[in-house]
Image (cartoon, rainbow, N blue to C red):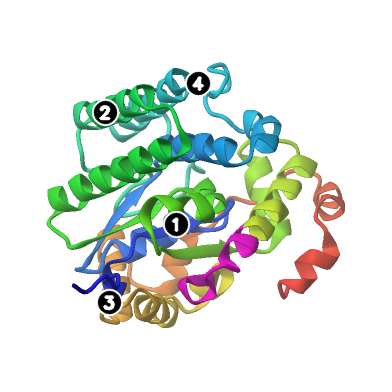
Amino acid sequence: MNLEPNLKNLPIFIGGFRSGTTLLVNLLGLHPELSAWFETKALCEALRLLRVLRSPASEQQESGLVRPAFIKGFSVDAVAQRMLSDLRETAARQSGHHPSGKAPGERYPLGHDLVNYSLNEAEAAVENWRVALNARADTMAAFSATGSLIRELGKRHRIHEGKPIWINKTPEIIRFMPELRMCLGPCRFIMVIRDGRQVVRSAARLGWAEAAEIAVWWKAMIEEARSGASADPNNYLEVRYEDLMARPTHQLDEIHRFLGVGSRGEDSFVRYLQALDIETLSEASSAWSDSPWEGDIANVELAVDAEFNASLGY
């Protein structure tokens, strides 16, 4: 029996902090083999529980990151309630009843959020996860149930679209590489990196947090992703937002090769332009770019770790 994983069909995850992950997953989702599945914060809550189970010392840090914050704790029922809350919020954003949280000028052919399964299907999957963990409350059961949850939702998503491979983009999910490998086996990860000064300006303009807090999380996410990638560096790729903006076709071809699918960068980018009814790279860039910064630029410059930013090439 061949127990080697199918390298072409490894689970794929994209992460990054206000660095162009939505742009990238929209471009990748135009490939005929890739089903773009994005903004699944509910999965992060299940993975957060696994982290706390693996490392109880992480509970305080992870408690500060739970969403929604008012549902506290790491009981199975509390985590399930946070997951259900996010599923319903995602459905409301997809239906247009809640705002996307993106900048007003950002336009994407596949949208700001994309799940192809119904809310009822997702709620049933979370209920199965909750029942499984309550029936056998140990770490092995939690990892098994969470792996089954991710596989089930990913399979439903790609089958509804009729494509063979799903690719998940959820910004924070890149933090949970060890947990994802323990749930799913080998995975591929893409981390999108952007100039920290631009990240802080962009996120602060949207009111996400103060500049200093944003800068801390931008740096921490990159460092945590790199730490997680050290266990399997061949299945980790960093993509610079600025390179994607400047040479999208070339960057997409490189990413397609990393993912083990046919290189279709030019085709995907042309389809992207057609979907937005634009014709040139400069027009596309305006659809991706943030509006002008109106905040305190000096404050942003002070917030970002200049040495770390320089180490990234900025």
How far from the left and from the top, in percent, is residue 279? 33, 71
Query: Residues in magenta?
Result: 225-238
How far from the left and from the top, in percent, is residue 273? 31, 67
Residue 12 found in image quarter = bottom left
Cα distance between the residues tagged 3 and 2: 33 Å
Q: Which residue is mark 3?
A: 261
How far from the left and from the top, in percent, is residue 259? 35, 73
Crowding at dot 1, Cα within 10 Å, few <14 / some 14-19 / many 20+, comes out as some
Cα distance between the residues tagged 3 and 4: 40 Å
Residue type at mark 2: give it.
Asn
**Secondary element at image label 3:** loop
Return the disc, 1 or 4, that comes first in the chain's sequence: 4
Q: Is residue 114 left or right of residue 213?
A: left
Residue 167 found in image quarter = bottom left
**Secondary element at image label 4:** loop
Task: Give whichever of 136, 45 is nearer the camera.
Answer: 136
Q: Is residue 200 magenta?
A: no
Q: Residue at x 41, y 42 (%)?
A: 143
Residue type at mark 3: give it.
Val
Crowding at dot 4, Cα within 10 Å, few <14 / some 14-19 / many 20+, comes out as few
Q: Which residue is mark 4?
A: 75
Return the disc, 2 or 4, that comes first in the chain's sequence: 4
Could one spot residue 295 in this view of the protein?
A: yes
Q: Are marks 1 and 4 in contact (CB under 8 Å)?
A: no
Return the disc, 3 or 4, that comes first in the chain's sequence: 4
Q: Which residue is mark 1?
A: 181
Q: Is residue 229 magenta?
A: yes
Residue type at mark 1: give it.
Arg
**Secondary element at image label 2:** helix
